[in-house]
Amino acid sequence: MEKTIDGSDATIEVTDVRKRFGSTQALDGMTFAVRPGQVTGFVGPNGAGKSTTMRVILGLDKPDRGTALVGGRRYQDLRTPLTHIGALLDAAAVQPSRTARHHLLWLAHSQGLGAERVDEVIRQVGLQDVAQRKAGGFSLGMRQRLGIAAALLGNPPVIMLDEPFNGLDPEGFMWMRGFLASLAEQGRAVLVSSHLMSELQDSADHVVVVGRGKVVADMSVRELLASMSQGRVTLRTSALNQAMTVLARSGATVSSTGADTVSVTGLPAENVVSLLSQNAVPFSEISENRASLEEAYMELTRDAVQYRGVVPEEAGR
Ligand SMILES: Nc1ncnc2c1ncn2[C@@H]1O[C@H](COP(=O)(O)OP(=O)(O)OP(=O)(O)O)[C@@H](O)[C@H]1O
């Protein structure tokens, strides 16, 4: 039943979307694209506009300006939307007295899909043992799985999940991470929001960082780390002066942090090693302190957060 994913269908394109609620400019020129075969993290502080963007993509909120396209088309123009995009916006939104399987059957029938597909998605998300239980008694983690099963019903090339890591225990967290990766491996475009970069650090290939209704960074996780990490290299040497001279000559900023320790910025560890070796400078214990993704994220969204007064101090930085 699983059809092959066509890359041209597996995209989301959000272009210059603006949306105002009263005096709040929720979206202020939001622009980004979600590509096939990747998990794209959509991250930003509370109130940055993530949920509103997702609602605009699903045609639930009408933008004042700009467009949001799924596989090149507006959601409103999709004849069978569930086969184009599967979304989970609010895991709590299930009828508590209905069993998980009945919830999915009801959804499937509304889209012309059969019970066979329902059982398939139940297996995919690992809910087979509880499928006959009432969803009202489900933990948040089980509801997340149920919501994802619903999103997968139409085998869509685009999957969009709002805060799917919310409330998951460590096992659920690991499962979600692996599951998102497998959806991307199948060629789907996967957009996942979070207000915590740490949740996306090992889950996303690419991140779109937002603050105050617009994109502040749009790059691969690797690029983000490289752009932010100052690459501070620390090394121990018995030839302190010689090491400092050699490294400073190459343009690095060098300072001694102890009788036999040197701190270097502006030069990757690899180059530090080769320079010292070429100049026969003895050294030991070389280490590179890279900025964590969380630090990079805090730096990028600092203005957005300060503006709202949520985290006024640079505590913990
Ligand atoms: N229906 C609405 N009416 C009024 N204001 C709204 C409405 N929906 C969103 N907003 C406001 O728009 C801004 C963006 O909200 P949004 O929920 O999109 O942010 P978010 O990034 O998803 O944050 P969170 O993680 O808190 O959900 C916020 O200031 C919010 O209060």
Image (cartoon, rainbow, N blue to C red):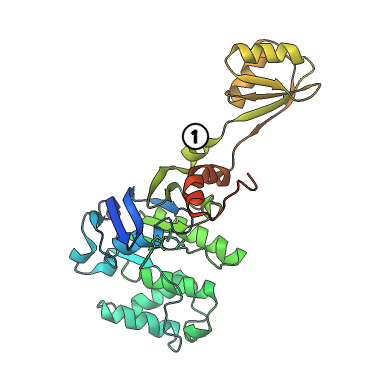
Apparent side of residue 76 relative to residue 151 in the rendered image (left or right): left
Give the number of marks.
Answer: 1
- The residue depicted at 40 percent of the width and 58 percent of the height is 50
Where residue 30 sits: x, y (%)? 33, 50
From the viewer's side, name the closer residue of 35 and 232: 232
Residue 53 position by quadrant: bottom left
At which x and y percent is residue 123?
45, 73
Which residue in the protein does label 1 denote?
227
Which residue is pictured at 56% across the width and 35% down the height? Answer: 229
Quarter of the picture holding the N terminus: bottom left
Up the image or down, 195 lies above or below 132; here it is above
| Most foreground residue, 75 or 311 | 311
Q: Residue at x 31, y 69 (%)?
A: 154
Q: Quadrant of ligand 1?
A: bottom left
Could you tell me which residue is drawn at 79 percent across and 21 percent down? 260
Q: Is mark 1 within 8 Å of ligand 1?
A: no
Horizontal arrangement in the rendering, residue 6 relative to residue 122 (left or right): left
From the top left corner, tell me how far across and down residue 270 is, in percent.
Answer: 60, 24
Q: Amino acid at mark 1?
A: Ser
Image quadrant where one finds the C terminus: top right
x and y, in percent, of residue 144 in the image: 48, 71
Q: Is residue 234 visible?
A: yes
Does residue 136 lie above or below 60 as drawn? below
Disc 1 residue crowd, few under 14, some 14–19, many 20+, Cα 10 Å: few
User: In terms of depth relative to the viewer, which is nearer, 305 or 204?
Assistant: 305
Residue extending farthest front: 23
**Numbered disc 1: secondary structure:** helix
Give the quadrant of residue 293: top right
Residue 5 visible in image? no
